[in-house]
Image (cartoon, grey):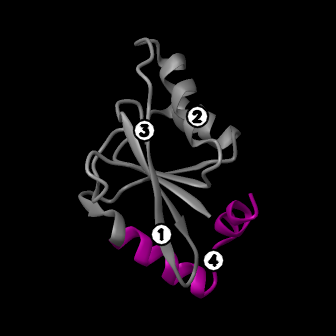
Amino acid sequence: MKIAFATSDNQSIDQHFGWSTQFAIWEVGADESRFLSMVDIEPASDHEDDKIDARLKRLADCTIVYVTEIGGPAAARLVANRIHPVKSRGHETIREVIGRIQAVLANNPPPWLRRAMQK
């Protein structure tokens, strides 16, 4: 499945969903993971709906989006588009999170993750 990480350096999850100008896209499976690309977000107006739309357009094929923070309206729009937003637990690296996801995938993923993987 494809997972997006709001990041400034493709190392750490360190950006707010609405303010991030780039997302690292990774393909993650139970046994392997690989970096696919950095997705740049085109500047939109400061209107919240425009900012959300710009991000949704670029992240449409992702299953999960990891961020440091996300507002309620943006989270609701992601969920409505079958993208699961996850707030990072603080300063985490992308590799740490991928390792935890792979451990869950290798065992018994929760129902929400099983549904998300079918996207």
Residue highlighted by disc 2:
56
Mark 4: which amino acid? Answer: Pro
Q: Earlier in the sequence, mark 3 or mark 2?
A: 2
Mark 1: which amino acid? Answer: Arg
- Judging depth in this view, the residue of 80 and 35 nearest the camera is 35
Magenta extent: 96-119
Q: Is residue 109 highlighted in magenta?
A: yes
Report if the CB atoms under discs 3 and 4 are less than 8 Å apart: no
Residue highlighted by disc 4:
109
User: In this rendering, which labeled residue sits more in front, label 2 or label 1?
Assistant: 1
Q: CA distance from mark 2 to mark 4?
A: 25 Å
Q: Give the crowd class for mark 4: few <14, some 14-19, many >=20 residues within 10 Å.
A: some
Mark 3: which amino acid? Answer: Ile
Residue 66 x/y as whole percent: 44, 53
Q: Residue at x 60, y 39 (%)?
A: 78
Q: Give the crowd class for mark 1: few <14, some 14-19, many >=20 residues within 10 Å.
A: few
Q: CA distance from mark 3 to mark 2?
A: 13 Å
Mark 2: which amino acid? Answer: Leu
Q: Earlier in the sequence, mark 3 or mark 1?
A: 1
Quarter of the figure with the N terminus: bottom right
Q: Is residue 57 highlighted in magenta?
A: no
Residue highlighted by disc 1:
34
Residue highlighted by disc 3:
70
Q: CA distance from mark 3 to mark 4?
A: 24 Å
- Judging depth in this view, the residue of 19 and 37 nearest the camera is 37
Q: Give the crowd class for mark 3: few <14, some 14-19, many >=20 residues within 10 Å.
A: some
